[in-house]
Amino acid sequence: MKIIHFGDLHVWRPQIVWRELNHPKRWLGPLNLLLRRAKRFPPAYRRAALDEILRLEPDIAIFTGDFSSFSLPEEFQEAAELFAPLREALGDRLFALPGNHDCYTPRAVRNQHLERHLPWVHTEPLSRLDLSDSLTLLGVHHSVPFRIHSNGQVNPESLTRLREEFASARAENRTVLLAGHFPYVSPPEHPEGADHRLRGEAPFIDLIRENAPALYLHGHQHIRWAIRPACTPDTVCLNCGSVAMQHPDIHKQAGFLSWTQPPDGTLQNLTAHTYDGQQKWEERPLEVRSLKIGDWKS
């Protein structure tokens, strides 16, 4: 089974939402777009990425959030158009979760801009897709609209349901892959800022350590890595990076991850795919790095 993991597309539209100017993000976001985000996320990269993923014909494609930049209907509409060929090819085997930029403000969440344009995205606290008779993919939704910061917040309901799904998987002897938008651990050279991290992560980490899903797939930080943290030694954490960001660092350059997934949960042929902006894609193996206690920050 070939799996592709990608995320952080960040479709953007330069627009002021006058009804929400009392919300700090509605003027901080456009300012950030003007100063750096517009250059960092060239529109042409979006189609190049989705076309390459479609060309590779994965069995499963997993998108771990941030279709948009500001949760604008126009951004979600463009994302829906970009994803349409992949959705047509894969159907429910295209598994997607929201990111914090898809839940940008309380009003955007209440108006369900994401759900209206991308109704197939899993916005429930916990979602499930059985990949085979012995392999299950679970997705957690921890994205909430903070006033200024880009944090996530562990949802108590997702913890309760996740605990139940882990128990069910154990009883049925199923291997679990887990996906979410936010990392719960970051390597020391890429620490997660206080305004960007997952809040309330301790019971989430405990649950992962106790139940040992084979993989935890996430994005949020725009850099690719594969780590086995000491706090969850039986789980490999994969960060897909951004699928559409222009950057000179090859680990931050636009791209995604692919691998072959046997039923037992082992990871084979883990590959980083990167885009140089000139219609050229490169592939290189990505090694899993083990982090000792003290080498990671949650």
Image (spheres, grey):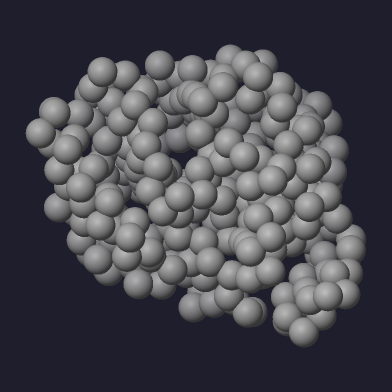
Which quarter of the image is occupied by the N terminus?
top left
Up/down of 212 relative to 298, above or below: above
189, 242: nearer the viewer: 242
| Quadrant including the C terminus | bottom left
Left or right placement of residue 180 versus residue 18 in this view: left
Q: Position of residue 182 (x, y in %)?
A: 47, 57
Q: How many marks?
A: 0
Question: Residue at left 28%, top 26%?
Answer: 135
Q: Position of residue 200 (x, y in %)?
A: 35, 72
- In the figure, is residue 258 to the left or right of 55? left
Q: Is residue 269 above or below residue 195?
A: above
Classify residue 132 by image quadrant: top left
Query: In this orientation, does residue 241 appear?
Result: no
Pick out the residue farthest to the bottom. 22
Q: Is residue 43 above or below residue 143?
A: above
Where residue 270 appears, as percent x and y from the top left, is: 43, 29
In percent of the image, x 68 and y 69: which residue is there? 107
Q: Position of residue 23 (x, y in %)?
A: 73, 80
In this orientation, does residue 265 appear? yes
Residue 243, image quadrant = top right
